[in-house]
Amino acid sequence: MLTEPRAGRLAAWGNALLAGLVSPDDAVLAIVGEDAVHRVEGLPGESGQVGLTLALGRLRTLGVSGLRVALPAPGHPLGLSGPPEFNARALEAEEAVVCHGAALGLVPDVYEAGPEGVRDEVVWHVLPVREAPPADVPSLGEAERELAEALREATEALTRLDVAGSGPVAEAAVDAYRARAERGREVLAPGYPSRAVRVLELAQRVGTLIAVATESGHGGAVSSSEMSARREALRPVERTARRAQVAAYNSVVEERERGVR
């Protein structure tokens, strides 16, 4: 997952709200984005589903001082710390939010609110987590260095596999991402360092290149074996980009822990 994850929006704007930098209404509006509605289920002290505004306020009273993102993939529990039940739910969803200051995590379930193409409804399930360092999350500095190398590797791999010269299709995909990034410049919310914004944008640019490369019909390689070769060549690059995304979203909490902020 290298587009903007819902867990990223929840963590970024939730962190801004917890720091007093945005109002509850603005935070919820940004978290929901283009979805129809978000609800939270399993919150301690609540018997049913509640809205995001109440949920974020309740998390604060439970001691939550920050929110981290996890973007796990098979064989790579990125950002997770257990227990197995939470990790399994997060892996199925391919994303999760882990609370700092309380042993809780949130995993989204996404439902279609109507006919295909209509906005989705999201239910965040609150589950217990293990209080331990998250798995395999680099610092911002490490992520930025790794991404620079990953971008070179991706370009070399695409050239080798006859994808980099795929012309207008690839350029259109990258241009579409750039336009979206410009419109959503505040995706990381107030309070995040400019370096985090830069790392996130580069990670998502790398993700766009990977998506273009792995779509059938682009470039010269079209057989199943050649498509498999593309995926294998770009797997380490995709892993690096996901790690960088998590580093960007988690940077505010990590810096606060180190006493930087």
Image (cartoon, grey):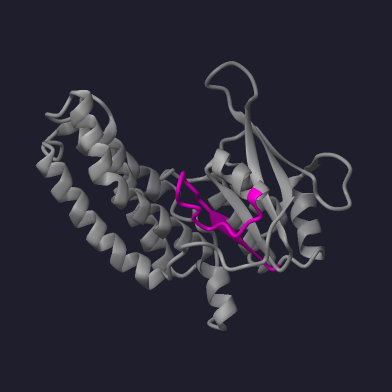
Q: Is residue 80 magenta?
A: yes
Residue placed furthest toward the bottom? 259
* Residue 132 versus residue 56 in the image, above or below: below
For image coordinates 74% across by 65% down, the residue present is 102
Residue 220 is left or right of residue 42, and the answer is left
Residue 10 visible from this viewpoint: no
Q: Position of residue 157 (x, y in %)?
A: 16, 46
Highlighted magenta segment, given as a residue range: 65-84
For image coordinates 30% across by 64% down, the residue present is 146
Determine the image quadrant of residue 24. Answer: bottom right
Q: Position of residue 50 (x, y in %)?
A: 80, 43
Determine the image quadrant of residue 227. Answer: top left
Determine the image quadrant of residue 119. Answer: top right
Q: Nearer the viewer, residue 225 or 244?
A: 225
* Residue 113 versus residue 46 in the image, above or below: above
Q: Position of residue 92 (x, y in %)?
A: 56, 38
Residue 157 is left or right of residue 14, and the answer is left
